[in-house]
């Protein structure tokens, strides 16, 4: 059975799930919110650093009927799971996907924005728990639905920060801004260079003739269950230690090689490795942006290789599965650059591939990866997509 995905089919599905919806068909709206892939700049966002994500043409879609009550009810079409919450009740976690929706509602209310009740159905072609920001996609889709027409009046960056706050204050993941920013602000065909300190950002053209390919390890992960918050705490410990040597620094963003070298001996060795990753990773973002702009694909490949090695050896968030995918990419002709993407602890790799090499890359991954890991991978060519939007 194929799930409804086009707006008309989703509206139809909503009228079946919510019997009252048929009579108010004209009031039904559909929003879409994409996932994202990060080209480079991992675990830099919460250190005031640089990131280079793009939204992808894999997305969550939400068809909803605004209601006059203060109740939100959402049904996920792939498994029929239905969850809901009252907008006037305090946030209460359930351990299910609805928490992203109720946390978003709580953060919007906290920001003083008007939210209204709704009934909705959700569908998706974005793999969940794959490090492609399906949670940020739910948050932004739900934010747009809860705000209704008022969403037009809220600036996209502001909305991204409110959704980040939903994760930080309510879900309990101390994430940076990258995922919510990507889902909210992305533009088709380009990556976005975001400075997480100034919040200035600009589009960066991707090499026009290369295909962006996401490879999913098939291993699931949820940030709540990972040591993501622990990594963030280690970065804060590194900053605190280095600030003793140089009180002028405001975050790891300000640490250069000299301070890092001087401070390393004073820090716990694990904490020192985390800092070394962040410092070099910010430089790699600058390198990749310059290399994209100069068409220097060899430099992109080298920065991706170094970035992956650093996440594996210094930040220690890669996995044998992610390493296997990067290793396979490394021996496949026509793969220009490959590395793990997102938080790590499982999830996906991002690859830049010549168009005529994509099929061979897929075949090689499907041939070799299961024997190396015992898991089934997914090879997903993607295009850089627009951010969250109302489509009906
Ligand atoms: C997750 C977080 C982001 C970012 C990345 C790692 O995706 O949500 O804020 O920290 O991990 O770069």
Image (spheres, rainbow, N blue to C red):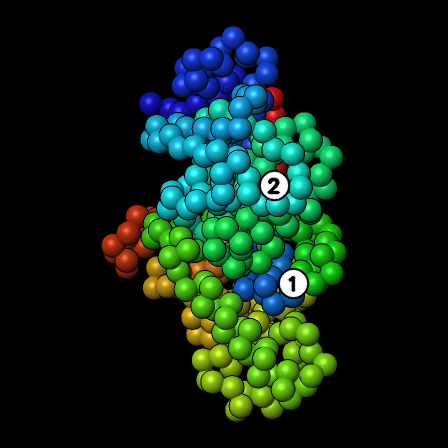
Whether the residue under disc 1 has CB within 8 Å of ligand 1: no
Q: Residue at x 50, y 70 (%)?
A: 233
Quadrant occupied by the C terminus: top right
> Does 24 appear above or below 98?
above
**Mark linked to residue 390:** none
Query: Helix, strand or loop at disc 2?
Result: helix
> Where does the image place residue 43, in percent across and percent down from the top left?
54, 64
Asked if residue 63 is positioned above or below residue 239 in the image, the reply reads above
Q: Are marks 2 and 1 in contact (CB under 8 Å)?
A: no
Taking depth in this image into account, of 5 and 355 the one nearest to the observer is 5
Q: Residues within 10 Å of mark 1 (few under 14, many from 20)?
A: many
- The residue at 28%/59% (across/down) is 372
Q: Residue at x 61, y 67 (%)?
A: 47
Q: Which mark is residue 50?
A: 1
x, y percentage for residue 262?
A: 60, 90
Q: On screen, 305 above or below 102?
A: below
Residue 366 appears left or right of 84: left
| Residue pointed to by mark 2 | 109
């Amino acid at each position: 059975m194929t799930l409804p995905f086009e707006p008309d089919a989703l509206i139809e599905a909503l009228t079946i799930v919510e019997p009252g919806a048929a009579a108010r068909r004209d009031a039904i709206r559909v929003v879409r919110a994409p996932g994202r892939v990060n080209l480079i700049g991992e675990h830099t966002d919460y250190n005031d650093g640089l990131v280079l994500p793009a939204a992808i043409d894999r997305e969550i879609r939400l068809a909803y009927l605004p209601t006059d009550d203060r109740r939100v009810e959402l049904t996920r079409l792939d498994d029929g799971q239905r969850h809901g919450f009252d907008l006037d009740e305090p946030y209460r976690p359930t351990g299910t996907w609805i928490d992203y929706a109720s946390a978003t509602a709580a953060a919007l209310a906290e920001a003083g924005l008007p939210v209204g009740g709704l009934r909705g159905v959700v569908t998706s072609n974005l793999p969940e728990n794959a490090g492609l920001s399906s949670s940020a996609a739910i948050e932004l889709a739900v934010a747009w639905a809860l705000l209704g027409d008022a969403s037009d009046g809220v600036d996209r960056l502001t909305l991204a920060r409110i959704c980040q706050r939903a994760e930080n204050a309510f879900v309990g993941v101390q994430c940076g801004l990258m995922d919510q920013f990507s889902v909210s602000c992305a533009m088709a065909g380009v990556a976005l260079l975001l400075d997480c300190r100034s919040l200035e950002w600009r589009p960066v053209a991707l090499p026009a003739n290369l295909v962006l390919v996401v490879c999913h390890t098939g291993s699931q992960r949820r940030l709540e269950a990972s040591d993501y918050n622990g990594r963030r705490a280690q970065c804060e410990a590194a900053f605190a230690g280095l600030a003793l040597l140089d009180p002028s620094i405001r975050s790891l963003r300000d640490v250069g090689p000299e301070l890092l070298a001087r401070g390393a001996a004073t820090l716990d060795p694990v904490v020192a490795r985390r800092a070394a990753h962040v410092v070099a990773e910010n430089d790699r973002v600058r390198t990749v942006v310059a290399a994209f702009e100069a068409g220097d694909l060899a430099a992109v490949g080298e920065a991706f290789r170094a970035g992956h090695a650093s996440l594996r050896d210094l930040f220690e968030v890669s996995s044998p599965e992610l390493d296997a995918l990067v290793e396979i990419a490394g021996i496949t002709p026509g793969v220009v650059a490959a590395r793990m993407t997102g938080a790590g602890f499982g999830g996906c790799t991002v690859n830049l591939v010549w168009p005529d090499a994509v099929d061979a890359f897929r075949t090689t991954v499907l041939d070799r990866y299961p024997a190396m890991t015992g898991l089934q991978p997914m090879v997903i060519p993607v295009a850089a997509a627009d951010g969250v939007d109302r489509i009906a």
